[in-house]
Structures are given as C-alpha cells and as structure tokens.
Amino acid sequence: MGYVMVTGGQEAIAAANKLSKYYRVKDAAEPLPVKEIEHQLRLLIDRVMGEGGLYAPEYAAIALKQAEGDTAEAAFLLRAYRSTLERDHYSLTVEPARMRVIRRLSSAFRDIPGGQMLGPTYDYTHRLLDFSLRQEGEEELRAFLQQWHLDGEVTGPVPTLAKVSELLRQQGLLRQCPAAADDRVPFDITMASVTFPAPRSARLQALARGETGAMVALAYSSLRGYGTVHPTIGELRVGYAAVDIPYPYADGGEEILIYIGEIMLTEVECINSFAGNEDGGAAQFSLGYGLCFGQNEPKAIAMAILESSLQTKGPAPVQDEEFVLMHIDCVEAHGFISHLKLPHYVTFQSSLARIRQAQQQAASK
Amino acid sequence: MFLPGKDDRAVMDKHRLSRLLVEGDRSIAAAWADAIASCHDVAVERPPHKSLVMARARDSVRQQPFYVGEILVTECTVKVDGVIGFGMIMGDEPDMAWRLAVIDAACNAHLPEVEEWLPRLLAEERVIAARQQGEYTKAARTRVNFETVEDYIGKV
C-alpha cells in the first residue's frame, strides 16, 4: 500500500483544535478540576491507566479531560507521553498475594480462609438512576464522610489473605508449578515487536494493557460457545500492592530495596475444567490468570478467560493467538480505524480510474 | 542503616525508611530535608525528573514473571557533603523526590541529625498502620457469608 503526503491545512487544523476546546468549555459552568476527575471517576481512571499501560492517576485524569472523556484517545495520550520518558528501573515482583485487600470473592467456594468481602462494588445494586446526585453538595459529602469514619471499630492489623489457588495446590487439585521459572526474563512488548507464537510473558503483558471492551467482547464469545472456556472464578481480589525497586547505588553484596508507593490491582484466578495431568496422574484443575491496573474486574476476568482460551486448540477466534493479541490493543485498533478519516486521495483516485476504465470497457463491448 | 538496637522495632533500613516517608506525613520529609540542606552542602547530581518503572508481576498459573505495565515516578540524585543519596516516588512529585534523596544521602553519610529521627519515624509508622487498619475495617464491613438454598431451608 502506498501513501502520498498531503500538505496544507495548518490554519484549518489550528482552528479545529480551538473549536474542540470551544465545544469542551462552551457550556461549562466552571472548569473541571483534574483532581476531581482523578478521584470521582476512579474506575474510568483505572481503565485508562490499564489501556495506556501507564500507572499515573493524575496524568490519566489530564488525558481524560484533554480527550473530553474519550478513553481510547486518553490511553493514546498516555502512551505517547510515556514514550518521552526514560525507563531505568524495574520493580521487584509485585505480589498480589500480599496486597491490602479491599474486595475479595470466590464464586467457586463459599468459605475461603479470610472470608469474602464485597468491597466497593455495584454488583448488588439496583440499576436505577440516582437523581439525588444532581443536588449532591459539599456539606452532604462532608457529613457522609464524617459518619463513615465514625462507624465501626478499627480492629487488629491488616491481614494478608492466602490465595485460594494455593489452597487448591496444597490439596493436590492444581498442578504444582516450578518455582525456578521466576528466573526467566520476561518478554517486553514495549521494547520489541511480538512474533507468533508469542512467549507467555508477552501474551500476558499484551492482555494486561488490552482494551477492556474488546477483551470483554472476545471473552464473552468464548462463554457463548465460540471457544471452550467457561470458567468459575476461584478468586477475584482488588487491593493495594507495594512496589519496591532495587536501590540503584547499592555497593554489591546484600540486595537493598526501597519502597516507592502502592498500586491498585485487580487479580483474577479462574478455574477451568479439569483434565488428567501430563504424567497420566490424577485429574487436576487448570487455572486462568488475569491481572491489571486499578479496579477493572471485567478486564481481569476477560484476561483470565482469554489466556486460558489461548492455551486450547480449535477454530474459534479466541483460540487464535494472533487474532486476539493483535486486536485488543486500543491504540493500534483505534489508530487504524481513525486513519481512514485522513486523506486517501491518491489511492482513491486510482480506484476511481480503474472503475471508469472498467465501465468504458463494458460500454464498448 | 541506623540504630540497630536491642529492640527490633529500632532497626530502620532503607526499605522501611522509604515506606514511612512515602506513606507518612509529607511535612516530616520536608522538615528533615530542609534542615539538612540548611546545615550541609547539598549538590544535585540529577535534578528531580520523571521516569518510568516497569512493574513486574508473576502469573499464578505457571509462576512465570511478566510485565503488567509501567509506573510514572519522579526520581532525584543528590550528594550531601559528597555522599550520594537517591529518592524516588510514584507520580509527579519533584519536591518529594528531592527530599527523599537528601534524607537518603544524610543516612548514607551517617550525619548526626539522623540519630534524632527514629522516634518520629516509629510514631509515624503507627499512624500509617492505624490508617490502613481503618481502611481495611471499612472493607471488612462488607464481609459476606453466602448460603445455598439448601442451607437456608435447613435453618428455617
């Protein structure tokens, strides 16, 4: 495919940018504070960070404001920004098993050690528009928060909750995984192009920054029969995980770590149908794994379904690694769709010339 | 790093210190860093600048590491009386990165001021623990016991 440069239009583009800003603010009573976007549109921020592949709540809020709420555009802005920065550090392995959990459930087991916590969720609410939000005022918010802080006695230290999958492993219901695998260096899709078949680490990284809607749609197709995976959620947890990096000026010997903050993560382990193990031993369950930035449960569940599905063989789209991984990236997908709006005059002119030629040939017969 | 005393709580290594400064009251780091800067020679080796940390995770299916995404951080490197110090914090926080670097350098240089910090750090650790306990308590209020219909019928 050939592309031809088009020049001109700078003034029109500048005016279009101003017009965009005009439409963003023309009916605004007051400017939308970035802090309020960050804190009151929490789930949207989480989604944009996940799809942009950059954990930066404040910058995600700026991106959303700039993009007038277009999540794909906001994710694109974050990706573009991150490409301007150096990356000299890698974290130690973030451990969701040790996270400060705010939500945890299992649809496979009623009784899990540590219990199930609904946490912040809309899962059990009536989907009725709350018109009182139109009049929500500062005083009302302050009163709510004051009452909320007073309610309930603070009890004991924050526990870390054992993973359900570990319990299944201990009971021999899940295959024991080789611990030495930790030594392997993961593939990094931000530094090298993925080729297929992709390493498992590349597959997981691509899924972790995939677009929520695309992933949910594909995972849904598997549940509806275009695939073989229809799992039960062994555990879903949402919480804060600590991030540590190696101290860069350590003088060798003992590894020194420093703490740089916490990130919120959603982790899902879904239990798939069981099968005899590779050694011909007793039947065991297989797991699917999902992990993403923020509280984004549909995405984490979809990731677990898709990564499980990609381990199966068959004709369904969700069993095709290239199909799934190449179509869930919002920046690439939206970019390619959007490029259709750009001038294609030369390529279209050639189509026009061909069709006229064909018509003339048909007329002359 | 300093004061490894009889009591384990008094062992303050870089990890524990950085966690307390990052999660704790920001005015602590500001006061200490300013105090060091007013009495010692602070040279900025690399000014506060934004960079990325790639977050490494491990999937629990194969126990294999993978990258879940990048984190925006601000980092800074300074020298205090010729001794290096490094600070890093998530987000766009140039002032805090500088303060963390100055405090780190002060610890590396074993400055006498550092000896005074431990009680305040231990107190702040308790504040952080209480805050996190409070947050967990709020989540724990949503603890739920699901029952099957058979269980429910058996009870009534």
Image: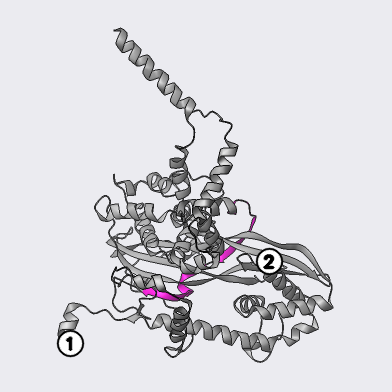
- At mark 2, the secondary structure is helix
* Above or below B27: residue A17: above
**Sooner in the amino-acid sequence: mark 2 or mark 1:** 2
Indicate whether residue A88 is drawn in magenta: yes
Amino acid carrying label 1: it is Lys
**Mark number for residue B155?**
1
Q: B127 or B14, which is in the foreground?
A: B127
Residue highlighted by disc 2: B94
**Residues in magenta, as a range:** A82-104
Q: Position of residue A26 (x, y in %)?
A: 50, 55
Q: Quadrant of the N terminus of chain B?
A: bottom right
Q: Position of residue A27 (x, y in %)?
A: 48, 58
Q: Nearer the viewer, mark 2 or mark 1?
A: 2
Indicate whether residue B153 is drawn in magenta: no
Q: A339 or B79, which is in the foreground?
A: A339
Sort mark 1 into few (<14), some (14-19) or many (20+) by Cα contacts within 10 Å: few
Amino acid carrying label 2: it is Pro
Q: Quadrant of residue A34?
A: bottom right
Q: A16 or A249, which is in the foreground?
A: A16
Query: Which residue sits at x=59%, y=54%?
Result: A82
Q: Quadrant of the C terminus of chain B?
A: bottom left
